[in-house]
Image (tube, rainbow, N blue to C red):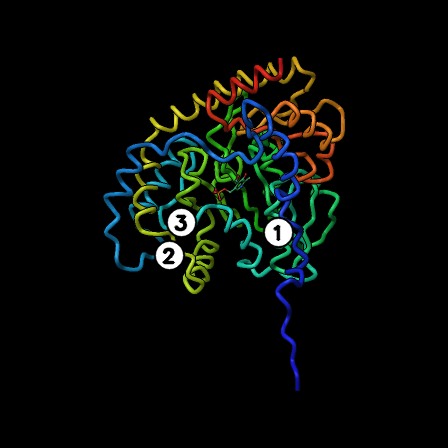
Amino acid sequence: MNVTPDRPEAPVNGLPDFPWDRLTPLKELAASHPDGIVDLSVGTPVDPVPAVVRQALADASDSPGYPLTYGTERLRSAAAGWLRRRHGVIVDQADVLPLIGSKEFVAWLPTLLGAGPGQRVILPELAYPTYDVGARLAGAEPYATDGLLTLGPERVPLVWVNSPSNPTGRVLPAEHLRKVVAWAREHGAVVASDECYIELGWEERPVSILHPDVCGGSHEGLLAVHSLSKRSNLAGYRAGFVAGDPVLIKRLLEIRKHAGMIMPAPVQAAMAVALDDDEHAEEQRARYAARRAALRPALEAAGWKIEHSTAGLYLWASNGAGCWDQVRALADRGILVAPGDFYGTAGERHVRIAVTAGDERISAAVRRLQ
Ligand SMILES: Cc1ncc(COP(=O)(O)O)c(C=O)c1O
């Protein structure tokens, strides 16, 4: 009998096309500007990795053996210490798990929690696309809504929240998060709170789902997901962690051990040092604050209205046109931004502008907008 295996080009669980590929022609247009492109699209860090962190990586580079999936106690304690010091969250170091950057966790959490066909994974209406991808990888249905109350009595495995938000820079107040936690506890859902921009509050101070004002001191059913990519310019190291419900953390650890989801030992050492050090994080914050302060009025003077954007790395902007027309108008000036519909249909009249270019490029953008 001739059995034909699934061909590699067959769609994988109905995953969407990788959105950034659709931006390529406009990237080429922006790159044709005589003074070069100002790329404010992806939001990748451009400033140096802090010297203390590089040193820690180098010092740990003789690392022949397998690291633990659970990470070192030193790393878990640094994460717990940072949460306490900076965010008023009390978590035991045993309830922290290192991640190889937070994106892999976002993509695999529904699978790791056993979500599957016939179940809905809830995500924000305007959201980082990987929440949707993660639901699909599990064979579950992604369901984008900001109104949990419209769902009725249905039990759901997982609700994602993201504050400060990518793409809008909106901050969810403690009161809102409290309602999400209460709803989830009634419906048997885990709440995963993606807090990777929590250190970048500008006009508002973001609060963690694990803060006692939100969860009443019990972490049951709650996971807070953190990343060092933006705080410490460690996107290239792949460094994040999740903390929260001890039972969930143990279960995730067991599966991740079997699956080999292990953070490299030198990165664990570097990440512990980064979490202990606030000085470099303050310097980085100041860089982003200055870029944001330069870019925002220039965009407003050029006809863009900025909405939300009280925290995080992005300006969520609109001049009233369709998002792709706005991307083109800016690409004509050599500035590349992301179309709002990458993040959901509710974004089709907005663009997302990252403040992640270097100072010289941000000044170039400001000049071009005049
Ligand atoms: C909302 C959100 N979550 C998670 C990530 C993934 O970050 P990383 O994998 O670098 O930790 C990003 C990256 O931009 C993001 O915007």
Contact between labelled residues 1 and 3, with CB atoms less than 8 Å apart: no
Q: Which quarter of the figure is the C terminus placed in?
A: top right
Tell me what residue is drawn at x 56 percent, y 28 percent.
37
Identify the image quadrant of residue 164. Answer: top right
Identify the disc placed on residue 172. Answer: none
Q: Which quarter of the figure is the N terminus placed in?
A: bottom right
Which residue is the site of mark 1? 133
* Distance between mark 2 and mark 1 Cα atoms: 24 Å
Q: Is residue 135 left or right of residue 64?
A: right
Q: Is residue 220 left or right of residue 169?
A: left
Mark 3 vs mark 1: which is more N-terminal? Answer: 3
Secondary structure of the residue carrying numbered label 1 = helix
Q: Nearer the viewer, mark 3 or mark 1?
A: 1
Mark 3 vs mark 2: which is more N-terminal? Answer: 2
Contact between labelled residues 2 and 3, with CB atoms less than 8 Å apart: yes
Which residue is the site of mark 3? 98
Please say whether residue 185 is visible from this viewpoint: yes
* Distance between mark 3 and mark 2 Cα atoms: 7 Å
Q: Is residue 62 left or right of residue 258?
A: left
Tell me what residue is drawn at x 41 percent, y 29 percent.
47
Image location (x, y in percent) of residue 40: 56, 29
Mark 2 is surrounded, within 10 Å at the Cα level, by few (under 14), some (14 to 19) or many (20 or more) other residues, namely many
Which residue is the site of mark 2? 69
* Distance between mark 3 and mark 1 Cα atoms: 21 Å
Q: What type is the residue that disc 1 sits on?
A: Val
